[in-house]
Image (cartoon, helix red, strand yellow):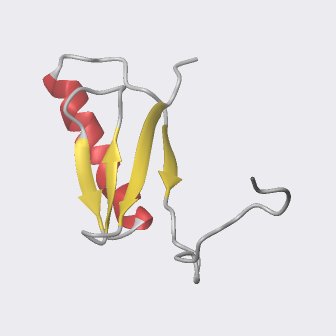
């Protein structure tokens, strides 16, 4: 069984886009406004890059691992541990 191509999608809050990269295929870097748009865009890009590199045994699937982080409201406050402070 051929393992899936693992894509890492990270939210770039400054640019307002998802940035997709992978270690499985050299040269694959792209961005989109939504995960759904990435899912639509990636298969064609991956097939093109694999064909260009001479790969004929294509993987059966793509796995997208998405990561985003948000600041909690009030997170600018200082945090002090409770207990003995010297």
Q: Is residue 23 above or below residue 41?
A: above
Farthest residue toward the left?
52
* Along the viewing direction, whichever of 5 and 15 lies nearer the viewer: 15
The picture places residue 82, in percent across and down from the top left corner, at: 82, 63
**Residue at coordinates 35% horizontally, 58% vertically from top-left?**
38
**Residue at coordinates 49% horizontally, 36% vertically from top-left?**
61
Farthest residue toward the front?
86
* Quadrant location of the N terminus in the rendered image: top right
Any part of residue 55 in sight: yes
In the picture, measured across the screen, residue 81 lies left or right of residue 71, that is: right
User: What is the count of numbered marks?
Assistant: 0
Any part of residue 40 in sight: no
Q: Is residue 74 above or below residue 15?
A: below
The picture places residue 24, in percent across and down from the top left corner, at: 36, 25
The picture places residue 3, in percent across and down from the top left corner, at: 53, 23
Q: Quadrant of residue 15?
A: bottom left
**Residue at coordinates 30% horizontally, 72% vertically from top-left?**
16
* Along the viewing direction, whichever of 86 and 4 lies nearer the viewer: 86
* Along the viewing direction, whichever of 31 and 42 lies nearer the viewer: 31
Q: Is residue 43 above or below residue 31?
A: above
Farthest residue toward the bottom?
73
In the picture, measured across the screen, residue 78 lies left or right of residue 50, that is: right
Q: Is residue 33 above or below residue 53?
A: below
The picture places residue 73, in percent across and down from the top left corner, at: 58, 83
* Along the viewing direction, whichever of 64 and 86 lies nearer the viewer: 86
**Residue at coordinates 65% horizontally, 68% vertically from top-left?**
79
């Amino acid at each position: 069984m051929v393992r899936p191509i693992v894509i890492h999608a990270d939210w770039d809050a400054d640019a307002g886009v998802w940035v997709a990269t992978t270690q499985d295929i050299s040269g694959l870097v792209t961005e989109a406004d939504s995960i759904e748009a990435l899912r639509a865009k990636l298969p064609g890009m991956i097939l093109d890059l694999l064909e260009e590199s001479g790969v004929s045994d294509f993987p059966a699937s793509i796995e997208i691992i998405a990561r985003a982080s948000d600041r909690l409201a009030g997170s600018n406050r200082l945090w002090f541990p409770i207990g003995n402070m010297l």
